[in-house]
Amino acid sequence: MPHRRVAVTSPQTRLAHARKRSRGRWRVPVLDPADVERAQRLFRIQRRRAMVAVAWLFALVLLLPLVFSQWPQLDTMRLLGIPVSWLAVVLIPFPAMVFLAIWQLRRAEKPEDQA
């Protein structure tokens, strides 16, 4: 005789499925025309400022290999037994990215505070 398959769920799952959803569809809040204009202006300013930060990020990531190709002696130089090129890969990009993130956040918040 074949075994009958039975779906097993926890009591909490059964209760959650039995409840009706009280929430309707999410709707985008309607803004006043003045607020729409302000929001669009802030978005444009913040997008421009973000593009500057992204450009600096790309410059940082793309120029570091160029530095290594221009100065191959960085592979032979050692500091505390570690090649300087390895230290540069660790010690330059990550702190610079943290600085860029903090700088961008402050630049993005400034127009909101002024408006």
Image (cartoon, helix red, strand yellow):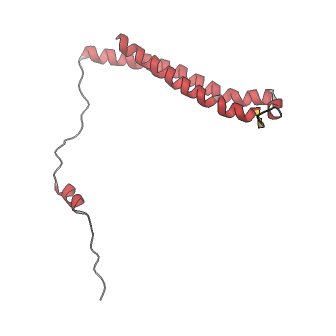
Residue 38, picture quadrant: top left
Q: Is residue 24 left or right of residue 52?
A: left
Could you tell me how many numbered marks the image carries? 0
- 11 relative to 63, above or below: below
Please report the residue visible at 72 percent of the width from the left and 36 percent of the height from the top.
Answer: 86
Residue at coordinates 22% horizontally, 40% vertically from top-left? 25
In front of the other: 7 or 87: 87
Q: Is residue 41 visible?
A: no
Whether residue 11 is visible to the viewer of this picture, yes or no, is yes
Compared across the picture, whether 103 is left or right of 38 comes to right
Residue at left 25%, top 63%?
Answer: 10
Spot occupied by residue 22 in the image (x, y as percentages of width and height): 16, 45
Relative to the observer, which residue lies in front, 5 or 41?
5
Locate residue 40, reporting x and y percent: 36, 18
Which residue sits at x=16%, y=51%? 20
Q: Which quadrant is home to the N terminus?
A: bottom left
Height in image: 13 above or below 44? below
- Occupied quadrant, residue 29: top left
Residue 47 in percent (x, y) is at 46, 21
Image quadrant in which the C terminus is located: top left
Q: In the figure, residue 85 lies in which quadrant?
A: top right
Residue sitting nearer the eye, 84 or 37: 84
- Name the outermost residue toward the bottom: 1
Q: Residue furthest top?
A: 114
Can you say whether 29 is above or below 34 in the image? below
